[in-house]
Image: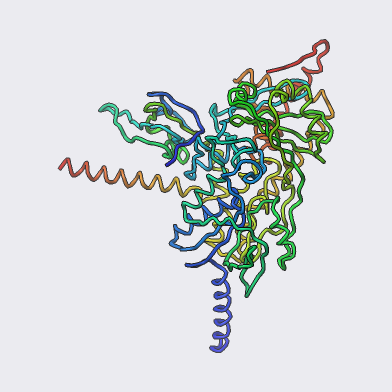
Amino acid sequence: MKHSSELSVLDSFASLANEEEAELSLSNGSRVAVVGGGPAGSFFSFFLLKMAAAVDLQIEVDIYDPRSFAHCGPAGCNHCGGIVSESLVQILATEGINLPESVVQRGIESYLVHMDVGSVAIQNQAGEQRIAALYRGNGPREGGESRWESFDGYLQALAKKKGARVLHQLITNIHWRKGYPCLQFADQKEARYDLIAVASGVNSNFLRLLEDMPAGFEPPRTTRAYVCEFKSTEAEILRILGNSVHVYLLPIPRLEFAAIIPKGEFATVVMLGDDLDQELVHTFLNDPAVGASFPSNAVPCVCSCSPLINMGARKRPYADRMVLVGDSGVTRLYKDGIGAAFRTAKAAASTAVFQGISEQTFRKNFWPACQTITKDNAIGRFMFGTTGILKRFRFLRCVILRMAAREQAHTSRKPHMSSLLWNMFTGSAPYTEIFVGALHPGFIGNLTLNFVANMWPGKKRKEVS
Amino acid sequence: MSEGALGKIYTDGEVIIKQDAAGDCMYVVQSGQVEIVQSTAAGEQHLNLLSAGDFFGEMALFEKEVRSATARAVGDAKVLKVDKKALFRRLQEDPLLATNLLQTMSHRIRALSKQLADHEADSR
């Protein structure tokens, strides 16, 4: 039996611990700042306010973003290919978020994979448009008056409808005062918050402000992509590209892969690779496989940029009263960055509302969602690594093309290769699931058969679907 | 609820799901209207008229039963299919995703309870 004084000491410690825990949680009147008004920031604000309302928690949410998505070109742009994946479209619809016609510039029905040995169209197995091609901002330069709305602006409006305030102020500094994070602005004014969610992406200067903080945030590893916009008429873009994203797997050194995405009267060219420069862009656009599917001389380039993309996760995208969501913290390798922003933002919001806002709480409840993405990225890195082998051996490209083309021509066949290519390029499934699919005996058997058939003497094939 | 742009267009009267057929997906109406009807011994019964943002076919996600009713377009309707696999993969990571589904199902149970009560009151 414990002595009464011992009990009281233990109780005191327990109450102290509880008080400390209680302090690091949101309560009525708490103020939350969201730095960055892109998808990650808007999703975080939307779900934070939705979940808070569900448990009668009254909080204030301020979204800081100096940009306005009403502007065309770089002023309102978020430097992105602008694809919302099939899986995210379905999840958003389940959440009650249905992307409107004013935002979706093209519903994508198929992916056309172009190689130097031929092309194959991979159709969506659902037989419907479940991938959205859109502009994150209000479109490129020379967009003029258009009927389209910005995707980021649409999501921001959803967050505003839930009660978030959007402030177009530039943050110049961040510091801690009495355990609370404070934001400083260009006019030297300050604002203290109970929680700060960083959703500024990797192309913002805000991340540099975090490098000197005691929490020791490390910036994520990055590389540069190349995005350029070509303009024509809507009918011409539809005629050339159809309702398809065109993906290029070409044996061009330093080029990982490239895609051309149709959007209204524009076509977005996205390239990923090492040390992308004008020479590489020129080589790609002049490649015969590209020229055959996209005569870029007929549609002038009106806007281009080389944004940074996240290639490696932060070790610890959280601290007491701070959490990093979307590209600022952890994202998916190459594909479905908006889907990763949705997942990390929602995990951070639910942690903040239901569990707390301490470093320990984020580690226990938010970090596992990030780790799911980082572990999957490790498999993804391996899968994309195999494209290097593909680029080296023309024969392998012929086998893949043959297998996919035959599956597409005979719909009764199980689409092993088509599913792999579809999921790799659309980002609709986790890389782990794609990898497991590639180990399926049916996939290996069919690949072997196509390998042998392609070696058969006297038959030189050029399979074009 | 704002109208959605994606999915597939069904023309007036076109059947989207058929009663007694097997199913492993649910649907979300993006635009237009979808009528839910059930064939009974007494003939076809109108159950519900759905519009943009409404779900149907969600029972197939949680039960291995056949479809309990037929859904067909009223005028042109755009409908998005949600695969069971895609949804369950995400539900495992984010159980809160089920909140919207539960809310819809709860509304339907409430509406059914009211209909039942009204029916009993009328038959007395």
Who's the residue at 26% across and 43% down the image? Answer: B116
Who's the residue at 47% across and 39% down the image? Answer: B61
Who's the residue at 52% across and 61% down the image? Answer: A354
Q: Whole-percent x and y of residue A301? A: 70, 31
Left or right: A245, with A18 as reference point: right
Left or right: A46, with A111 as reference point: left
Q: Whole-percent x and y of residue A312? A: 74, 50
Who's the residue at 52% across and 35% down the image? Answer: A147
Q: Is residue A377 above or below residue A419?
A: below
Left or right: B110, with A120 as reference point: left
Can you say which quadrant of the picture contains the N terminus of chain A?
Answer: bottom right
| Front residue (pair B84, A354) | A354
Q: Is residue B24 visible?
A: no
Left or right: A210, with A130 as reference point: right
| Front residue (pair A436, A422) | A422
Question: For residue A86, what is the image quadrant?
Answer: top right
Q: Is residue A91 above or below residue A195?
A: above
